[in-house]
Image (cartoon, helix red, strand yellow):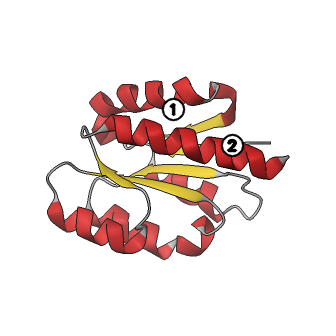
Amino acid sequence: MFKILFYCSQELNGSFTELRKIIEKEISSDHIDIIKKFHTLSKKLKDVNNQYNIAILTACNMEELNCLHAWKDCLIHMDIILIVPKNDKKALIYGRELYPRYITEIGRNYGYLNHILHNLIQRSKTREI
């Protein structure tokens, strides 16, 4: 079954609603696990039985980016969309080093995010058949 892991920090409440709408435009909420606490994300990622196809992760600061780097082995089988703070060039550069394929900034170019998500969902569904 197709599943998306969506982590959006509580610090980003304004962006959360907007991001959730984009995701739910592409796939029903039954297929999305929404997490707002970083320690809950840690538990989900470290669970060896996690069956997520796509992870949409927001990293509000360098500490969260470092943790995501430490959990890279847990994320290896998923397509990752990483969202970093707007105008934080250090986070953007580091994020690109960690997950170079799909990265965008909070509040910027959600059309790009929508396009990426649509393509990843279609590709993952095709793989399941």
* 10 Å crowding of disc 1: few (<14), some (14-19), many (20+): some
Residue 95 position, x and y percent, is 33, 66
Quadrant (top left/top right/bottom left/bottom right) for the N terminus: top right
Q: Amino acid at mark 2?
A: Lys
Badge 2 or badge 1: first in the primary sequence: 2
Q: Quadrant of residue 102?
A: bottom left
Tell me: residue 5, above or below residue 96: above
* 10 Å crowding of disc 2: few (<14), some (14-19), many (20+): many
Residue 60 position, x and y percent, is 29, 53
Q: Residue at x 61, y 68 (%)?
A: 74
Q: Is residue 36 visible?
A: no
Q: Which residue is mark 2?
A: 3
For residue 48, the mark is: none
Query: Nearest the camera: 76 or 124?
Result: 124
Q: Residue at x 28, y 28 (%)?
A: 14
Q: Is residue 55 visible?
A: yes
Q: Disc 2 and disc 1: Cα gap in Å?
A: 12 Å
**In the image, is 111 to the left or to the right of 55?**
left
Residue 108 position, x and y percent, is 24, 40
Tell me: residue 94, above or below residue 102: below
**In the image, is 125 to the left or to the right of 33?**
right
Residue 8 position, x and y percent, is 41, 42
Query: Nearest the camera: 47 or 73?
Result: 73
Q: Amino acid at mark 1?
A: Ile
Tell me: residue 43, above or below residue 128: below
**In the image, is 44 to the left or to the right of 113?**
right
Q: Residue at x 24, y 64 (%)?
A: 91
Q: Which residue is mark 1?
A: 23
